[in-house]
Amino acid sequence: MKSKIWLSSPHMGGNELKYIKEAFDSNWIAPLGPNVAGFEEDLKVFLKTEKEVGALSSGTSAIHLGLILSGVVAGDEVICQSMTFSASANPIAYQGAIPVFIDSEEDTWNMCPLQLEKAIKDRILKGIKPKAIILVHLYGMPAKIDEIITIANKYDISLIEDAAEALGSTYKGQSCGTFGEFAALSFNGNKIITTSGGGAIVCNTKKSKEKAIFLATQARDEAPHYQHSEIGYNYRMSNIVAGIGRGQMEVLEDHISLRRDMNQFYKKIFKDIDSVTVFEEPNEDYFSNHWLSCITIDESKAPFSREELRLALLDENIESRPLWKPMHLQPVFKDSDFYGTNICENLFNTGLCLPSGSNLSELDKKRIEDTIKKIL
Ligand SMILES: *Cc1c(COP(=O)(O)O)cnc(C)c1O
């Protein structure tokens, strides 16, 4: 059996162990310590932002805290991009709030600004103004940020950016994750950098970061004994995990350029194939980290179907996967409202994510290319 080629697998830089050893040597084996503070500072510098970064146990917990800090409580409505990973939407349910899903647009595959405004107007007519908007930068592609921010401001609704896949992506030169009232980053095992599992919240003010960390560390009031006047969570990142993060920050720029090279690699393979479109930035305002490289296949023109290509790759032990299945089509959210047509549904039906890791060897790439060319 040939070795497995993954869509996206962990890629260590080398210095991660040094930071972990420092944590052991100083006995900072806890959900706080120098690596946690150092990792937060590294992220802040990388994002080129005055905003505050708080390291957490996951990207999901960052979205959850973003909702809580936006004042979302049971019965509220929260608008969310339909085409995304379930972790964007699940925290809405944790709060007992009601998700309202929005279609994608064709350029970035992210939230359609027209459908967003339509939804907000309609909900207001029905007597409920949504409390927050969760915007995702799928596969690293920045969403139509100017348009979305204009709408969020116009209706005075908190914008939460799910930048879990978009660390290193920029829009008009500004980092994804620095546009919203709050933003979530993820360092899960398959992301552009990984801490094995972990995340971070980006907050507008020092005060809101302090509140996020307070909630992430069981909401302890100031007192010598354990006293609580709010429900808290155990969402803080550990100092060991943050050590991996500090090592990974040293190679993040490399990972971005290697992932972008993978995108070029696929563009070359499919250059003369009319029925296949490689997903790329709509114009120079957008800079994607190309966390995953994706294609869409026009099955009316292609000599093969999306599923045939996926299975041909699988035969060679090469992982590929259909694009995210929209949330409004998921059994768990089947009763939720959806504003849009069939754009994200079509993407789901025709799109495929291809191996995109920063650690793919020339041999891996040759295997991928040969397998694709065979079916072409
Ligand atoms: C990975 C991911 C998350 C969740 O991050 P975790 O760190 O795994 O909790 C949220 N949203 C999107 C779009 C993701 O890809």
Image: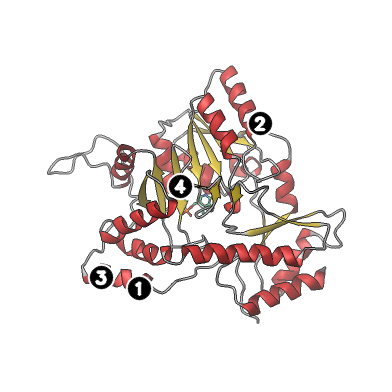
Instruction: Report how far apart the C-alphas of labels 2 and 4 lie in the structure.
Output: 24 Å
Q: Residue at x 65, y 37 (%)?
A: 112
Q: Which residue is mark 3?
A: 24
Give the Cα distance between marks 1 and 4: 26 Å
| Number of numbered discs | 4
Q: Evaluate if marks 1 and 4 touch, with contact meaning CB atoms under 8 Å apart.
A: no
Where residue 97 sits: x, y (%)? 48, 33
Ligand 1 contact, mark 4 (Cβ < 8 Å): yes
Respond yes or no on whether mark 3 lies under 8 Å from ligand 1: no
Q: Quadrant of residue 367?
A: bottom right
Is residue 54 rendered to the left or right of residue 81? left
Q: Nearer the N terminus, badge 3 or badge 2?
A: 3
Residue highlighted by disc 1: 17
**On the picture, is 297 further left or further right than 64?**
right
The extreme left residue here reads: 224
The mark found on residue 339 in the picture is none
Percent of width and height locating residue 271: 78, 63
Q: Is residue 190 above or below residue 75?
A: below
Instruction: Tell me which numbered mark, 3 or 1, is placed earlier along the sequence.
Output: 1
**75 or 184: nearer the viewer:** 184
Res. 95 image quadrant? top left
Q: Which residue was labeled with disc 2?
A: 114
Residue at 33 percent across and 52 percent down: it is 236
Query: Cβ–Cβ below 8 Å for labels 3 and 1?
Result: no
The kind of secondary structure element at disc 2 is helix
Residue 127, x across and y down, in percent: 54, 18
- Disc 4 is placed on an element classified as strand
